[in-house]
Amino acid sequence: MRLGISTGGGDAPGLNAVIRSAVLSALSRNWEVLGIKRGFAGLMGDDDVVSLTRESVRGIAHLGGTILRTTNRGNPFAWPRPRGDGTYEEIDRSDELISNARQLGIDAIITIGGDGSLAIADKLAAKGMRMVGVPKTIDNDVACTVTTFGFDTAVSTALEAIDKLHTTAESHDRVIVIEVMGRHAGFIALHSGLAGTADVILIPEIPYEMSKVADKIRARDRAGRKFSIVVVAEGAKRKGGQESILGPSMPGQDRRVGGIAGRIAYDLQELTGKETRSLVLGHLQRGGQPTGYDRLLATRFGAAAVRAVEAGSWGHMVALQSPHIVTVPIKDVLKEVKRVELDHDVMKTARETGISFGD
Ligand code: F6P
C-alpha cells in the first residue's frame, strides 16, 4: 500500500499529531507514505509530494500548524486560473489530480480537512479515488462527529483572552466586546463565553437585537456590576441583518466573515453611554500547541484513518461518537449542517446562569 496524506483548508492545532499518528500506523503495516504538500497542490504540479518517514514525523505531535502546509484556495474541481486580464476563471483539474496520483502509485489518500475538503474528498471518491477523511476545524461545524480536533484548543485560547479581559474591564468599568472565530457556527463563542462567564454571547444561530444587549448591560450596571464582557462570534448577525464581511477574498476562497466586534462596540457605547472597547482575537485561535484533548483526539483519528484504509472504507470519515471512534460515510456528513442546537444543555445552562443572547 502506498498511502498519500494531505491537509486542506484553514489549519487547526492537532494536524501534525494526526499526520504523525497516521504515518507511524501505516509504517507499522509496512506501507509507504507520501505527503502531498499544500492541500492537493502537490498532486497538480504546483507543489511537492514528499516521502514521510519516522524521521519526518519525529517530535511534531505538540506543534501547531502542519508540516505539509495547507491552503483554502485549492479546490481541484474549481481551481482558480488567471485569464490574463486580472480576472480568474475556475477550472476542473480533478482528472489531472487523479492521473498524477496514479502515476505516483498512490493507492489511497487520507485527507484531513473541514467541510470543504470533505466535499472534495467525496467528489474524488465518486471518480474512483480511494479516499478516507479526518474531520478538522477549530469551528466544530462538521456533522456526525461529537467534535473536531482543533476546537478545544481554540476554545482554550479564547477563554484565556476572556479571563484577561475581565480584569481590565472591571478595573475601568468598561464594556469589552471580543470577537472569536467560527464562521457560520457559534460553538467557539458559546463554549468559551460560558466557560469564561461572559455576560452576553452573540452567535449566528440567534440573530440579536442591539437594544436587548444594551438592556443587559444597563441591568448589570444597576446591580452594581459596572463592567461587562460580550463574546461575539464572527458570523453573528442582527435580527433581519447579514453577516459582516471582512473584505474581498482571494480567487478560489470563501467569503471572509468577521469585523463585527467594532460595530457592536460603537453601537453599545452610543446606547449605554458606557466606555466600550473591542478586539478581534483572530488567527491566534488557530495557532499554538494543541491541548491535551486535541492531541489525543488527533492521534486517535490518525490511527483510525489508517484502520479505515485497511478496511477499505472508501468515501468514509473517521468520527468521534463517544466513547468510540467510528467511520461514517462522507455523504452523510455533508447532508447535515452542524450548528449550535438551541435546546442543547450548554445553551440552557448559559441562559439559566444569566447570559444574554441578545434575543
Ligand atoms: O474555518 C476556520 C476559520 O478559522 C474560520 O473560523 C474563519 O472564518 C476562517 O477560517 C478564516 O480563514 P482565513 O485563514 O482565510 O482568514
Image (cartoon, grey):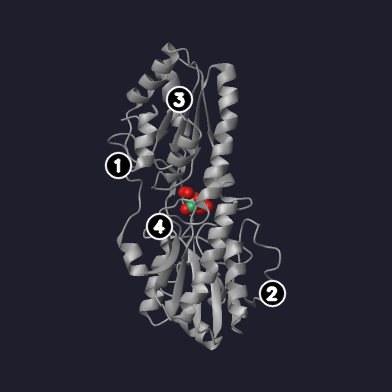
The amino acid type of the residue labelled 4 equals Val
- Distance between the alpha carbons at the discs numbered 4 and 3: 33 Å
Query: What is the quadrant of residue 220 in the picture?
Result: top left
Return the residue found at the far left.
240
Look at discs 2 and 3 and give the one toward the viewer: 2
Report the disc number at residue 266: 3
Going from the N terminus, do you reach mark 1 or mark 4 first? 4
Which residue is identified by label 2? 54
Above or below for 91 versus 155: below
The amino acid type of the residue labelled 3 equals Tyr
Residue 277 in the image, given as x and y percentages of width and height: 53, 25
Going from the N terminus, do you reach mark 4 or mark 3 first? 4
Callout 2: CB less than 8 Å from ligand 1: no
- Distance between the alpha carbons at the discs numbered 1 and 4: 19 Å
> Would residue 107 appear left or right of 284 to someone viewing this image?
left
The amino acid type of the residue labelled 2 equals Arg
Going from the N terminus, do you reach mark 2 or mark 3 first? 2
Residue lying at 44% horizontally and 52% vertically, measured from the top left: 140
Q: Quadrant of the C terminus?
A: top left
Q: Helix, strand or loop at disc 2?
A: loop
| Structural crowding at the residue carrying mark 1, measured as other residues with C-alpha within 10 Å and reported as few (<14), some (14–19) or many (≥20) | few
